[in-house]
Structures are given as structure tokens and as C-alpha cells.
Image: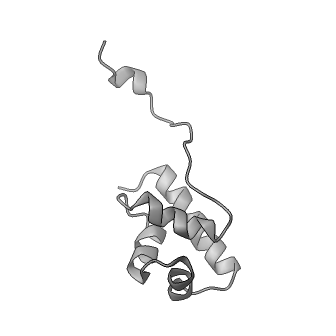
């Protein structure tokens, strides 16, 4: 299942790639990652290497960073 954060990331990359009129292959070549990685990223794969995601995001002047979670972690913590 794809969570909301991954969907946002996937949609961002796909939208930026298309706005710059790049194919997935062109994006993979410019970012120095494989075409399979781009496909998995745009499809919201849950387990991807952060360094490779940052290579792609760098082309759009962005990088990964912490954002506030929608989950309530207090209910999962042990006292």
C-alpha cells in the first residue's frame, strides 16, 4: 500500500519531469540512476534508497527532509 507521503513524492517527480518535457529514460540519465529506479519512484515504491531519490530531486532544486507525520506516535510508544 502506498502512503500519502510517497504519493506526494511520486506525483512531484512525475509532474516536474513532464513539465520539463523529459522521458523517464532522460530523467534517469540526467540523474545518474537507472530507468527502473525512476519507474519505481514514480509508481510509489515504498523502499527506495534516499541518496538516489536525492539525486533525482537535485535536478529540480529539492532534497528529502523530515516532515510532520499524520500518525499519532504517542499511542505506539511504550512508557
Asked if 75 appears above or below 49 in the picture, the reply is above
Q: Is residue 57 left or right of residue 77?
A: right
Q: Could you tell me if residue 76 is visible in this image?
A: yes
Task: Quadrant for residue 48, please give it.
Answer: bottom left
Task: Quadrant for residue 21, please give it.
Answer: bottom right
Q: Could you tell me if residue 10 is visible in this image?
A: no
Q: How far from the left and from the top, in percent, is residue 79?
A: 31, 12
Task: Quadrant for residue 78, please give it.
Answer: top left
Total marks shown come to 0
Q: Nearer the viewer, residue 6 or 61?
A: 61
| Quadrant of the frame with the N terminus | bottom left
Q: How far from the left and from the top, in percent, is residue 73?
A: 41, 27
Asked if 72 appears above or below 40 in the picture, the reply is above
Residue placed at 43% from the left, 51% from the top?
A: 3
Residue placed at 45% from the left, 68% from the top?
A: 41
Q: Nearer the viewer, residue 65 or 70?
A: 65
Q: How far from the left and from the top, in percent, is residue 2?
A: 40, 56
Q: Is residue 47 left or right of residue 54?
A: left
Residue placed at 51% from the left, 37% from the top?
A: 69
Amino acid at each position: 500500500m502506498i502512503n500519502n507521503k510517497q504519493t506526494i513524492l511520486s506525483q512531484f517527480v512525475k509532474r516536474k519531469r513532464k513539465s520539463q518535457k523529459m522521458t523517464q529514460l532522460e530523467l534517469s540519465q540526467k540523474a545518474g540512476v537507472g530507468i527502473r529506479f525512476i519507474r519505481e519512484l514514480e509508481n510509489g515504491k515504498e523502499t527506495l534508497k534516499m541518496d538516489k531519490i536525492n539525486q533525482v530531486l537535485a535536478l529540480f532544486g529539492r532534497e528529502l527532509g523530515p516532515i510532520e507525520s499524520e500518525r499519532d506516535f504517542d499511542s505506539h510508544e511504550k512508557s
